[in-house]
Amino acid sequence: MHRTLPAVLFLAALASAQSVVPPFNTAWQAVVIGQVPNVGSYGGTAIHPASPNTLLVSPWPSTSIDAVPLLRNGAGQIVGTGAATPAISVGGTDGGLAFGPGGVLFGTWFGANNLHQTKPGSTATDRVDSLTSLGLQNSVGACAVVPTGMPGAGRLKVCSWIGAEFRDVPLTPDGAGTYAPGALGPAISLANDVEGMVYAPPGTPSFGGQLLVCEWSYGNIVTYQVDANGDPLPATRQLVVGGAWSPGGGTRDPITGDFVFLGSGGTLLVLRQGATPCGTSTNYGTASPGALGTPTIGATGCARIGETIGIQLGGHANALGLLAAGSYEWNAPWENLTVLQSLDVAIVVVLGPTGSTNVPIAIPANPQLGWAHLYLQFAVLDPSTTSGLSASDGLDLLMR
């Protein structure tokens, strides 16, 4: 018999890495592509439907929207980038960048609280409007355009960074190829500061027809259901990705249906279709045998947040033992034993007549546990040794 390892154990093993949380991790995975050369900050992202191998980025603070070549594998997935080069001169930038009606590129300008527009083929901003005069009091952070097939298709949306004030922006052609924004729609308060937004078209796995939002300070990417105008319903917020590095922007890859974000330091993050892979279990170190044999340890199941895995333990029949777990690897000789992990938690285990058992570990749905290591070792009573114990080798459990 045994007790389940307590969830508090995992709080000692926090890792600073992005993870997709349940239920979304059965359909999506977060992939860090790496730092984009010549881009040193977070900001907006946009892929033109007619040029799917070029990513436009608007890192903050900057006076340039840059073009980034995308590198793809045989399946069309983004696996790398070339160096960014200046493409469009603008007055200022931030996390908003989106193609709208007429192929016009809309962008946000943090601080000045402006919305700028660039016509197809232009290398400089063609129109700039003050959002303050239209009713947005806190400086804008992000913008998005509702895609075809969704309620409110073609409508422009903006959201402030401070206060997370979401607003609809009516657009009227101005006769010059750009659009005159009208008085903003009613304010909708979202949770946390917003540095990026992108709509997921209908049919997208898990969150089709919803709005993805980057919560910059919290390292979150969340989703909201929307109303008949394409506006988010605050009560429907769900966490999709946690532990991301100051995520911003948001654009959908027209080739794969993946989503692309630009985070801290100019790091490209792709929310890629396909279940988050299971973590790994690796034995390490040297076991400490006794006259009654050598205890064993292994793992079964999927080491992924929100899942339950089994720690398979072996030894002699009816053995009384301890399963120890810690947040870092160790190598400490003691009597006849080598202790192979920090001793953060230990539970009593009785193997019974078969000389084996399986201890379940429920991994909390905590995104900070993605890429965290848990180190385990099993020891049993053995009077033949100087310590009175014999022990298995170590088990390095990497969670995803």
Image (cartoon, helix red, strand yellow):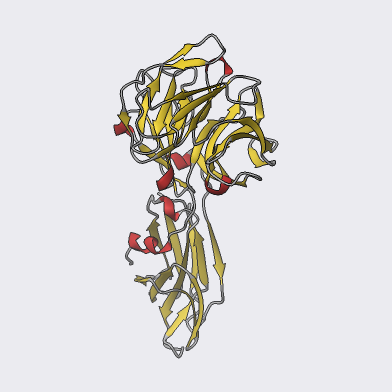
Q: Is 390 drawn above or below residue 73 in the view shown?
A: below
Can residue 305 be seen?
yes
Q: Position of residue 298 (x, y in %)?
A: 50, 64
Q: Residue at (29%, 33%) from the top-left corner?
A: 235
Visible residue check, residue 259: no
Residue 287 vs residue 95, the one in the foreground: 95
29 or 114, which lies in front?
A: 114
What residue is at 65 percent from the left and 28 percent from the top?
Answer: 52
Q: Give the residue at x 39% y 61%.
A: 10
Answer above or below: position of 161 versus 7.
Answer: above
Picture quadrant where residue 47 is located: top right
Estimate the x, y position of residue 213 in percent, counting from the top left.
Answer: 43, 35
Left or right? Give the position of 14 relative to 61: left
- Judge left or right: residue 72 versus residue 333: right
The image quarter in which residue 83 lies: top right
Residue 266, how many percent across, how many down?
57, 45
Quarter placement of the N terminus: bottom left
